[in-house]
Image (cartoon, rainbow, N blue to C red):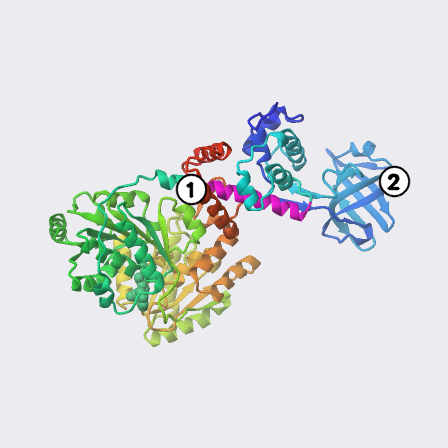
């Protein structure tokens, strides 16, 4: 008897050659075959009369062959079969290329079902190369038909037939990896029904039941997998921190923390008091005040006698953090230092010495913090800012400077919680989902290129009022190796400086510049030494120039929504009303819808969710993150509620039976999934 590991060649009609072609689709066993889900469906249920056919639209029609098929050789190797068919309402002319066999197959007076794109006009309807089936023997017409992703040598028909046979062979032996109790508690259909209807849905309802069941199963297994990963994560015992009276810290702040900041702080402090090392991601939209959460943790750690380090991805960010935090914390008796690549060798040495003597409590810096020579006396808390710029390796390198320090990672990429759970399986997640009060939302406009002159005038007006402007002109990603990024930026800057704003100061920055050069330009801009900064997306990350009041993005359609949101976050950081102008000549409906999202909301999480919905998780993080393990049916962008449900079910099951001893089918499937995807999970 067949099982799921039986090769596909056992299916009649699949020989060695076809098997090879199928292998390109990742199908080698019956199990693979039935788990090869359709990309979409064609609804061919409705049959139209010939008269009701709409030229340009696909439709099914039942019609009787009225004329003997004729064959014409139109040119070498190209035969054309012509047939006329009729129903009560009209005449349909059918043509088939290179299907001469139909000539003898289709019989005058017999009725067939045709499915294809209607053509012609009101008087004469026609179809070219439709699907033909004898009435009463329909496989590909008169029903909802699956449409699979294909490869050379495998047609839809072959796949449909193969899957059909695969399903028939496997129907009795499909293991249900969802425990019955879970299935029943969540109103999910049986596995056999799900597989049958995900391929050959009897109705829309059946399809959605099948989808729901399979998506749930994926998310359920996924959650179990994540939990296991977390459980397997090295649990490091640390001396639990003592509770600290935080009042002096709160009192020293010029504002009161938002509820969300407070909650994140509490969560982090609870971690540090727990006796195991903290591993937490703190996520918050630009301007949500993550730095203060970090400061709170630093204060808490310092009062517990631990040293803390904060690592920023760029020199200028490190400087900004230092400028913002040192005065506050020094006042509270915490000794602070700044250590970056441009710190003079002598100072570096002395900071190093003080760090290893424990005379500095808190050091802020860049990569310089993890270079070999720096030693700490008692590094107990490591904070990394804008974590997506750091690899896990750097995080680890800094952590290794201490003995299992607590780790707090701060990210401004507002990843929907669902996705955060998945991408940061090794971290606990806190989300700052609230902005400090009194922020003026950035006014956002999406305009065509014909607005350039007006935009330049607008910039001029703002500059006259003392403000500064960003213009992002690059169309390439920062790490892209395309050679003309530099050119695009320098030429546009030159054009603006010489042609448009000869009386203003235009500076520029791009990703091909050395980081020292970049920092120098940014610092000068922050000091107000230039009016306009032309750049690529290098300014995307956390730099604070409160005086900048307008962000212009050229070719806005080339950026992801989340990226646009990050760019927009560069303005609106001061007391001035700020503006974001997205320029695009792209008329594509989807593009316009995306840009419209930007003009409608400033909520980073909403935007991220929208981005995810429009682009899918693969694009969201670029190729690197492509393909989340085991998720074929579930869409984490859309199935948020289902993920929550599946997650709760998984947690309840693990609570009851952490080793899944009573659920061998679940355990086996889990192992299989994670063996296949070990890399994707880390
Ligand atoms: P981000 O989350 O983008 O790193 P920051 O920590 O840089 O945000 O904070 C942005 C600005 O908001 C800073 O100027 C900071 O001083 C201010 N800020 C932070 N928390 C609050 C608060 N609770 N109330 C008012 N302003 C705040
Ligand atoms: Mg920040």
Look at the picture and state if 391 lies above or below 54: above
Would you say residue 211 sits in the magenta stretch? yes
- Say left or right for 44 vs 602: right
**Residue 133 showing in the rendered view:** yes
Q: Position of residue 240 (x, y in %)?
A: 23, 48
Residue 536 visible in rendering: no
| Few, some or many residues within 10 Å of mark 1 (<14, 14–19, 20+) | few
Residue at 48%, 50% in the rendered image? 644
In the image, residue 553 sits, relative to residue 176, either above or below, namely below
Closer to us: 158 or 445: 158
x and y, in percent, of residue 442 in the image: 41, 68
Instruction: Please report whichever mark, 2 or 1, sits nearer to the chain's N-terminal start.
Output: 2
Name the residue that disc number 1 marks: 655
Q: Marks 2 and 1: which is nearer the front?
A: 1
* Marks 2 and 1, how far apart at CA: 71 Å
**Left or right for 39, reference 419:** right
Count residues near mark 2 (Cα–Cα under 10 Å), then give few for <14, some for 14-19, many for 20+.
Answer: some
Does dot 1 land on a helix, a strand or a loop? helix
Q: Which residue is mark 2?
A: 67
Magenta span: 203-226
Question: Residue 106, how many percent across, how many down?
Answer: 82, 35
Q: Which quadrant holds the N terminus?
A: top right
Task: Judge left or right: residue 161 versus residue 350.
Answer: right
Q: Which quadrant of the structure image shows residue 682? A: top left
Q: Is residue 274 above or below residue 455?
A: above
């Amino acid at each position: 008897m067949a099982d799921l590991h039986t090769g596909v060649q056992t299916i009649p009609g699949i020989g060695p050659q076809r098997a090879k072609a199928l292998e390109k689709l990742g199908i080698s066993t019956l199990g693979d075959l039935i788990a090869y889900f359709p990309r979409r469906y064609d609804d061919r249920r409705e049959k139209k009369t010939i008269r009701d056919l709409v030229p340009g639209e696909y439709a099914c029609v039942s019609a009787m062959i009225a004329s003997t098929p004729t064959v014409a050789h139109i040119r070498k190797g190209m035969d054309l079969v012509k047939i006329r068919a009729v129903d009560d309402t009209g005449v349909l002319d059918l043509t088939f290329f290179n299907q001469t066999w139909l000539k003898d197959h289709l019989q005058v007076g017999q009725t067939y079902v045709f499915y294809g794109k209607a053509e012609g006009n009101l008087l004469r309807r026609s179809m070219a190369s439709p699907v033909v089936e004898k009435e009463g023997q329909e496989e590909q017409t008169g029903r909802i038909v699956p449409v699979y992703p294909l490869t050379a040598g495998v047609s839809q028909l072959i796949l449909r037939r193969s899957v059909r046979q695969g399903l028939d062979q496997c129907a009795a032996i499909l293991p249900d990896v969802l425990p019955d109790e879970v299935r029943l508690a969540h109103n999910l259909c049986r596995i056999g029904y799900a597989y049958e209807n995900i391929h050959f849905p009897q109705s829309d309802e059946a399809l959605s039941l099948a989808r729901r069941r399979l998506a749930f199963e994926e998310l359920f297994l996924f959650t179990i997998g994540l939990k296991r990963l977390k459980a397997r994560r090295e649990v490091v015992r640390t001396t639990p921190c003592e509770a600290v009276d935080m009042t002096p810290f709160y009192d020293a702040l010029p504002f009161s923390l938002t509820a969300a900041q407070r909650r994140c702080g509490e969560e982090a402090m609870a971690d540090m008091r727990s006796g195991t090392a903290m591993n937490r991601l703190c996520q918050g939209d630009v301007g949500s005040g993550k730095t203060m959460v970090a400061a709170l943790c630093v204060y808490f750690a310092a009062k517990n006698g631990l040293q803390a380090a904060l690592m920023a991805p760029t020199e200028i960010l490190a400087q900004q953090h230092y400028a913002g935090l040192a005065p506050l914390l020094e006042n509270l008796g915490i000794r602070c230092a700044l250590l970056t690549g441009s710190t003079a060798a002598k100072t570096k040495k002395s900071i190093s010495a003080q760090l290893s003597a424990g005379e500095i409590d808190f050091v802020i810096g860049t990569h310089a913090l993890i270079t070999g020579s720096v030693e700490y006396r008692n590094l107990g808390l490591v904070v990394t800012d804008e974590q997506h710029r750091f690899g896990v390796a750097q995080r680890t390198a800094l952590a290794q400077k201490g003995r299992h320090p607590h780790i707090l990672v701060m990210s401004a990429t507002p990843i929907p919680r669902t996705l955060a759970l998945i991408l940061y399986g090794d971290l606990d997640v806190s989300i700052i989902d609230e902005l400090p009060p009194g922020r003026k939302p950035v006014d956002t406009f999406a305009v065509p290129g014909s607005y350039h002159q007006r935009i330049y005038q607008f910039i001029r007006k703002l500059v006259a009022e003392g403000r500064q402007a960003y213009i992002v002109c690059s169309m390439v990603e920062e790490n892209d190796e395309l050679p003309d990024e530099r050119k695009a930026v320098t030429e546009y800057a030159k054009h603006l400086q010489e042609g448009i704003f000869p009386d203003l100061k235009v500076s520029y920055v791009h990703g091909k510049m050395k980081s020292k050069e970049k920092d120098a330009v940014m610092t000068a801009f922050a000091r107000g030494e230039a009016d306009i900064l032309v750049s690529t997306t290098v300014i995307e990350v956390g730099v604070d120039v409160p005086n900048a009041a307008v962000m212009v993005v050229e070719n806005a359609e080339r950026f992801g929504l989340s990226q646009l949101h990050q760019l927009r976050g560069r303005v609106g950081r001061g007391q001035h009303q700020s503006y974001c102008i997205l320029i695009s000549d792209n008329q594509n409906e989807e593009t316009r819808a995306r840009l419209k999202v930007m003009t409608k909301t400033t909520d980073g999480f909403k935007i991220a969710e929208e981005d995810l919905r429009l682009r899918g998780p693969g694009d969201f993080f670029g190729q690197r993150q492509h393909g989340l393990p085991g998720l074929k049916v579930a869409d984490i962008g859309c199935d948020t509620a289902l993920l929550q449900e599946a997650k709760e079910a998984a947690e309840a099951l693990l609570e009851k039976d952490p080793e899944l001893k009573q659920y061998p089918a679940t355990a086996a499937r889990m192992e299989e999934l994670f063996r296949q995807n070990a890399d994707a999970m880390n």
